[in-house]
Structures are given as C-alpha cells and as structure tokens.
C-alpha cells in the first residue's frame, strides 16, 4: 500500500500553486515590459519616418523623395539595426527606397506598426499614408531589424529572472520551514509514544497537541483505556484461575503421595504414579501462570521495587535447587559476587528459578549447570549449561509463550523463558540467548539496566 507523507502533501498543495502564481506573475510582467519597450521603440521608429515625409515633393504630378545625402545618413544609419524604407504611389508603383514589401491594406493617415520579414530577417515596420498637395496620395514605410529590441528584452528577462528565482527559493524555504514548525507538535507526539514501553498505557497528554489533532489523541487515549481494562481483566482472570487451581492440586498431590505409601497392586501403583506426575506438571503450570500474571504490564505496583543483592537471591536458590540437581546427577555450580540492583524480590527469584529449572530439564545426567552473578557496571545474571542447546533459528521463538523446540526432551510447557522475558522487561533488563564459549549447551544472560543499580553505602 502506498503511504503518503503529510509533509509532502502540504508542500505540494502550498508550493505548486505558489510557484505557478509566481511564474504567471513573472510572465505577465515580462509581457507588460515587452509591450512598453515596443511602444518606446515604435515611437523612436516614427521619428525617421516623419522626417522622410518632409522630403516628399510633387514633381510633374508625381511624388518624389528628394533626400540629400547628409540627411539620408543622419536618418537611416543606426549603430544596432539596419534601416529600410520605401515610397509607393497610390497605384502600387514603387517610387523610392531599399525596401521591397507589399503595402498592407490597413494603412491609413495614422501611423501603423506591424512585424514582417525581409531578406530572411525579422523587421518592425512603421507605415503611413501621405496626402500630397496635388490631391494624390502615397505610402511611406520605414523598417528596422530587431537587434536592439531583442537585446533590450533579453536584459529585461535577465533582470526579472534573477529576483524571480530568489523569490521562488525564499518561498520554498519559508513554506518548508513553516510546515516543519507546524508539524513539530505531531513529531513530538510521535516521539513520546515511540519512547514508551509496551507496558505504559497511560493517556497521552492532550495539551501539547494542536486543536486539529486532539480528537485523534482523545480517540487514542480511549483505546488505551479500553486496552488497559482488557489487559487488567485478563491478568485478574489468569491470576485467579491459577490461584484457584493451586489449592486443589496441592491437596490432590498430597493424597496421591499418601496413597502410594500403602500396599497396592503393581497396576494400581503405576496408575497412581502417572497421576502424581500429571498432578506435579499441572501444579507447575499453575505456578508458572501465576508468575506470568504477576509479571504482566501493570500487575506490579511501583513501590514493589526494592534494593536487592543478587548474590543473596542466588544463595537462597542454591539451597532449593542443589538437591534437585543431585537427584538428576547434574553438577550445579555457582560463581557469585556481591551484585546490587533494584527489583521486585519475588519476580527476581522466579526469574532465577525458571532459568535453573530450564537448564536442569534440558541437561542430561552427568552434565553441568553454572549460575553466575556479577557487577559489570550494572547487575548481570548468567545461567550456563552444557545440555542440548537451543538452535540459533529458535532463539527468538522460545521466548514466545507455550513454544517448545520440536523434538526437545522433557515435559516442559514452554512458559519458562517467556516468564523470564516478561520479568526482564518489567525490570528494563535485556535477555540474551547465546552459545557458551565451549560451544555446547546454552548461555542465558540477563543484563539489568544502569538505572536498576543502587548504592549500599
């Protein structure tokens, strides 16, 4: 679909008519100046014609032009143009001159000016019907080439073109600057919305928006409000459903574990064992859904963030996860240093728990998992394993909810890394899925922002 730029539309609608009007004005001014120049040169051409008329006499009943040589040089010599003339009797007989052109029918006793061509050159002609003393008449024509007229018009055109170009450029700059200033509030609004995170559903301030844009901003705010209500409703439903499932699932798990301690047939024991495994998986899913609901945008109050030492969180996790790793014959190691950040304690623990659980699930017996926390300007948490790894083509997809790499072992539900991603976003942290330096397995790094660092001094 072809997208149209508002700036280009405004420039087109404003500049094109403005430049057209400027061009029309320049053309009109040029023609007015040309006509004024022609009138001046026609009056100048009239002078030699009237002077020649004074030398026309009637000899033996015929008009004769008695032009002395000195007067001829004075009247017919020009530094710029060639001067031509002819005297024609009323019957069309040519009487004198060096011009050979027919006499137009519209010549009268008033000077008549017209354009023609002679010897391949354009000329301007002044013609006059002369009434002689004997009652007869004759036609006198004086012509000149257009050199000085063309030269003068070229000068007029150059003098008009330079200011017209300057005015056109100034108009373009002024219109462009005006449109840029006029669209600046829209640009500011766009930058403000683009700078927001996906969790920020606050209304967009309307007081900065122009009057023409405020209805759009109001509609956007109404949409954000409806979206916020919808997301809050989904979060409440998810949290309530997960919470309601936890209690009966815990009771069911306890009852099945107690039943397995008794004496029963092998077939019944196998059935109860399968039921216990399904109950544990379902309880794990309920816990993950509850964690996901807590990590959703808007689910956490602003005062939930607290100063934390990531090393203490990792040490607490070690007491819970080392026995599980030993059951699976996996070497779970820790590389820790004091690491300060500001975060929500429960979500940080859930983030770490999901990373360790994910590493243990996909690392075979005899493998190793290493948890690191370090202060590299900001807090950094890493969990590295030498398990089956995640193909590079799948590293973005595994962050989607309920996505599992095809053919991967285990009974995971595909929510672990999605939960880690949401918790990282809540803390403005970045999540990276990398290959370990050894090449085998997976290295997941969570880098917290500088703003999450606090000083304990």
Image: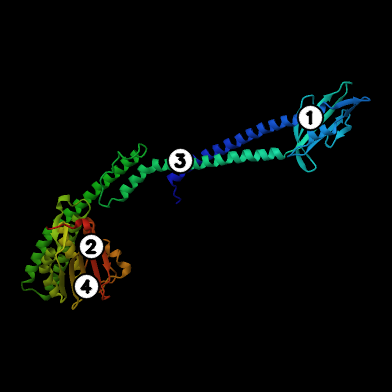
Neighbour class for label 1 at 10 Å: few (<14), some, many (≥20)?
many
Residue beneath label 1, please? Answer: 49
Q: Position of residue 116 (x, y in %)?
A: 77, 37
**Residue 31 in sight:** yes
In the picture, the disc for residue 447 is: 2
Q: CA distance from mark 1 to mark 2?
A: 99 Å
Q: CA distance from mark 2 to mark 3?
A: 48 Å
Q: Which residue is rendered at x = 88% and y = 33% of the image?
A: 94
Q: Which residue is rendered at x = 70% and y = 38% of the image?
A: 148
Disc 2 secondary structure class = strand
First reached walking from the N terminus: tag 3 or tag 4: 3
Question: The C terminus lies in which quarter of the figure?
Answer: bottom left
Tell me whether the residue at label 3 lies in contact with that at label 4, contact meaning CB atoms closer than 8 angstroms.
no
- Of 382 and 416, which appears nearest the observer? 382
Q: Residue furthest left?
A: 262
* Image position of 408 (left or right of 65): left
Q: Position of residue 246 (x, y in %)?
A: 13, 59
First reached walking from the N terminus: tag 4 or tag 2: 4
Residue depth check, mark 3 versus mark 4: number of the one nearer the observer = 3
First reached walking from the N terminus: tag 2 or tag 3: 3
């Amino acid at each position: 679909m072809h997208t149209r730029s508002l700036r280009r539309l405004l420039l087109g609608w404003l500049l094109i008519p403005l430049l057209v009007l400027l061009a029309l004005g320049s053309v009109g001014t040029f023609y007015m100046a040309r006509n004024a120049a022609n009138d001046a040169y026609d009056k100048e051409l009239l002078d030699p014609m009237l002077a020649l008329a004074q030398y026309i006499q009637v000899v033996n009943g015929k008009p004769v032009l008695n032009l002395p040589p000195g007067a001829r040089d004075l009247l017919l010599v020009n530094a710029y143009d060639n001067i031509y003339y002819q005297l024609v009797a009323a019957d069309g007989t040519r009487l004198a001159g060096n011009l050979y052109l027919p006499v137009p029918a519209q010549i009268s006793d008033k000077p008549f000016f017209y354009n023609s061509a002679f010897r391949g050159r354009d000329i301007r002609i002044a013609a006059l019907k002369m009434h002689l003393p004997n009652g007869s008449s004759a036609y006198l024509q004086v012509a000149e080439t257009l050199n000085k007229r063309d030269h003068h018009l070229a000068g007029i055109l150059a003098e008009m073109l330079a200011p017209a170009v300057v005015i056109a450029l100034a108009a373009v700059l002024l219109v462009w600057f005006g449109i840029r200033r006029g669209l600046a509030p829209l640009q500011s609004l766009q930058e403000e919305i683009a700078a927001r995170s996906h969790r920020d559903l606050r209304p967009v301030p309307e007081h900065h928006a122009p009057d023409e844009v405020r209805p759009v901003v109001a509609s956007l705010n109404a949409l954000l409000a409806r979206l916020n209500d919808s997301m809050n409703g989904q979060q409440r439903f998810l949290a309530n459903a997960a919470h309601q499932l936890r209690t009966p699932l815990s009771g069911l798990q306890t009852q099945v574990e107690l039943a397995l301690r008794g004496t029963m047939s092998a077939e019944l024991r196998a059935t109860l064992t399968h039921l216990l495994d399904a109950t544990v998986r379902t309880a794990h899913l309920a816990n993950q859904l509850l964690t996901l609901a807590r990590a959703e945008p808007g689910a956490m109050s602003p005062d939930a963030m607290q100063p934390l030492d990531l090393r203490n969180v990792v040490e607490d996790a070690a007491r819970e996860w080392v026995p599980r790793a030993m059951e699976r014959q996996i070497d779970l190691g820790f590389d820790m240093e004091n690491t300060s950040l500001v975060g929500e304690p429960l979500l940080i623990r859930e983030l770490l728990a999901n990373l360790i659980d994910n590493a243990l699930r996909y690392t075979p017996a005899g493998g190793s998992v290493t948890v690191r926390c370090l202060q590299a300007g900001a807090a950094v948490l890493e969990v590295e394993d030498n398990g089956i790894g995640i193909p590079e083509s799948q590293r973005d997809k595994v962050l989607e909810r309920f996505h599992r790499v095809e053919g991967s072992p285990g009974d995971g539900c595909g929510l672990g890394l999605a939960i880690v991603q949401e918790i990282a976003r809540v803390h403005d942290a970045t999540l990276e899925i990398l290959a370990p330096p050894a090449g085998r397995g997976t290295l997941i790094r969570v880098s917290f922002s500088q703003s999450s660092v606090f000083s304990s001094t």
